[in-house]
Image (cartoon, grey):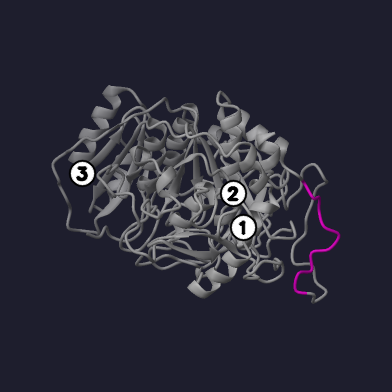
């Protein structure tokens, strides 16, 4: 991939998520994607940018706004009529302000700060490929009836997923969509459980369901394939196993081919596509670019929050639960202020101090999205994982290569999973924690097929095991606490309601 960023990325959530909906002041209805074309009229005064235009959902208003977009020198790319979101392109620098003045428009803004051309993930560090020699060593240590590389999968044992698979590996009627950099469905550990009918390429805002469109651009775009394996790699005697090896997994690609970024219009498309194709759970190990936080007093950033929230709420109403990673900056997400030095990440970043209660990470901070922190083999918060009382919902294995080293053949504290081109490798990050929790959610959905997203979230929290706040969190041993955990054994800032438990989920 041209620009898969392994630098630390932050994803936040707030406990009073419903206040976000109230602040936005809209109640979108159910939706269906309906492409709408318009003549291209461009201005030569500025770069050609993408916009989201959020309107009332009646047909007359959307028609009037669509006409206004054309008259203002824009081009309608796609219309999601039932949620009132229109994706448009324009090269007129005044396009956003002009469209915001149109009657029926509730918010509108640019989704990027650089021109359109012909990743926003939460993994921490580059991938560590498993060599043939290392694989042979791991296979020699394989236990009876386990997968050949399972001896290195300390994460499965940490949450009882190995034992859970013997009771209920999950139902093939449940699908987890990996909204990410694409999934290599030809990998032998993924092919048995892959759902092509629920997969697409949503880059640009319009779903492409042609054969293979969901696959990663190159082998360097490994993130989505790794995530998919953590969720549902099959127990087929080939390599590794997923948390829920009996469920289906699909891939919805949203990463831009030129810079790897996850732009809002692509994510809107992904949520709507997942909902319209019967996906029960989505995994979101990223934040929507280009803003790490989207502040509601900025018209462009407000429009991004508005558009993506409409799409994820639509999916939730249709029965889809969303899980997302908490970020890798070891930040207290319930603090009064956080310094954002990375936004916008598609042009020149400008350092700003934001209040995470007023400037939102998308989609993690949206109402109803489950926020997941990361743990290592010792069941302790990973050194990089962000945290925060009332912010983190649950925790799951994400790996810790520095301070929590497992007694496995490779002695690698990160997470082993599938990679493109039939390979395997280790990654760590809250990107890896979220799919573990998504796998447990899939097991719960298999056990409780009629459970709503809200009920599934409650079940996730109920089955979790909370280790409580540690007496000390001086990971590097320098005498200074590296993070402060607030709360008790039931709910706290490190683990939320606790670390997910696959075995409890199937019992």
Mark whose residue sits in front, 2 or 3: 2
Q: Answer whether residue 392 is visible to the viewer in this image.
A: no
Give above or below for 141 relative to 25: below
Observer-nearest residue: 261 or 275? 275
Q: What residue span does the magenta drawing correspond to? A: 466-476
Determine the image quadrant of residue 31: top left
Give above or below for 422 relative to 99: below
Residue assigned mark 2: 436
Measured from the top left, where is residue 194 in percent x and y?
41, 44
Q: Residues within 10 Å of mark 1 (few under 14, many from 20)?
A: many
In the picture, the quarter occupied by the C terminus is: top right
Q: How many marks?
A: 3
Observer-nearest residue: 403 or 26? 403
Kindly indicate whether the residue at mark 2 contacts the one at mark 1 (C-beta within 8 angstroms): yes
Q: Is residue 450 left or right of residue 200?
A: right
Measured from the top left, where is residue 216 in percent x and y?
35, 57
SS class, disc 2: helix
Q: Earlier in the sequence, mark 3 or mark 1?
A: 3
Residue assigned mark 1: 398
What numbered label is drawn on residue 118? none
Q: Earlier in the sequence, mark 2 or mark 3?
A: 3
Residue at 64%, 48% (x, y): give it: 162
Q: Earlier in the sequence, mark 1 or mark 2?
A: 1
Was residue 501 drawn as part of the magenta stretch in this picture?
Answer: no
Determine the image quadrant of residue 451: top right
Q: Answer whether residue 224 is visible to the viewer in this image.
A: yes
Residue assigned mark 3: 75
């Amino acid at each position: 991939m041209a620009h898969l960023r392994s630098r630390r990325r932050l994803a936040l959530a707030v406990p009073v998520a419903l206040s976000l909906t109230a602040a936005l002041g809209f109640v979108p209805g159910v939706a269906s994607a309906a492409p709408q074309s318009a003549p291209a009229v461009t201005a030569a005064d500025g770069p050609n940018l993408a916009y989201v235009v959020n309107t009332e959902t009646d047909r007359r208003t959307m028609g009037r706004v669509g006409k206004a977009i054309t008259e203002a020198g824009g081009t309608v790319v796609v219309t999601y009529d039932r949620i009132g979101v229109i994706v448009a392109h324009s090269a007129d620098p005044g396009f956003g302000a002009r469209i915001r003045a149109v009657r029926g428009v509730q918010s509108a803004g640019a989704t990027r700060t650089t021109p359109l051309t012909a990743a926003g993930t939460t993994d921490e560090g580059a991938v560590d490929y498993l060599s043939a020699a290392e694989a042979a060593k791991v296979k020699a240590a394989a236990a009876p009836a386990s997968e050949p590389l399972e001896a290195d999968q300390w994460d499965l044992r940490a949450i009882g997923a190995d034992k859970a698979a013997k009771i209920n590996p999950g139902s093939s009627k449940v699908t987890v969509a990996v909204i990410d950099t694409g999934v290599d469905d030809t990998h032998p550990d993924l092919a048995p459980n892959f759902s092509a009918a629920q997969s697409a390429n949503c880059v640009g805002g319009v779903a492409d369901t042609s054969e293979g469109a969901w696959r990663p651009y190159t082998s360097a775009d490994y993130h989505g394939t790794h995530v998919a394996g953590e969720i549902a790699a099959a127990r087929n005697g080939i390599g590794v196993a997923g948390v829920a090896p009996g469920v289906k997994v699909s891939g919805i690609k949203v990463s831009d081919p030129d810079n790897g970024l996850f732009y809002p219009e692509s994510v809107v498309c992904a949520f709507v596509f997942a909902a319209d194709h019967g996906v029960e759970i989505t995994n979101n190990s990223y934040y929507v670019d280009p803003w790490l936080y989207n502040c509601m007093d900025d018209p462009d950033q407000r429009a991004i929050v508005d558009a993506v929230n409409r799409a994820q709420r639509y999916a939730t109403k249709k029965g889809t639960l969303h899980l997302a990673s908490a970020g890798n900056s070891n930040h207290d997400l319930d603090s009064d202020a956080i310094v954002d030095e990375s936004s916008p990440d598609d042009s020149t970043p400008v350092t700003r101090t934001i209040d995470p209660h007023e400037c939102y990470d998308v989609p993690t901070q949206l109402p109803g999205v489950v926020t997941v922190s990361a743990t290592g083999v010792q069941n302790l918060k990973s050194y990089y994982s962000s945290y925060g009382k009332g912010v983190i919902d649950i925790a799951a294995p994400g790996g810790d290569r520095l301070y929590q080293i497992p007694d496995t053949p490779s002695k690698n504290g990160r997470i082993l999973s599938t990679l493109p081109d039939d390979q395997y490798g280790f990654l760590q990050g809250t990107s890896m924690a979220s799919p573990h929790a998504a796998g447990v959610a899939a097991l719960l959905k298999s056990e409780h097929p009629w459970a709503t997203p809200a009920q599934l979230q409650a079940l996730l929290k109920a089955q979790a095991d909370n280790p409580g706040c540690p007496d000390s969190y001086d990971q590097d041993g320098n005498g200074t606490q590296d993070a402060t955990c607030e709360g008790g054994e039931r709910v706290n800032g490190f683990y939320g309601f606790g670390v997910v438990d696959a075995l409890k989920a199937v019992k």
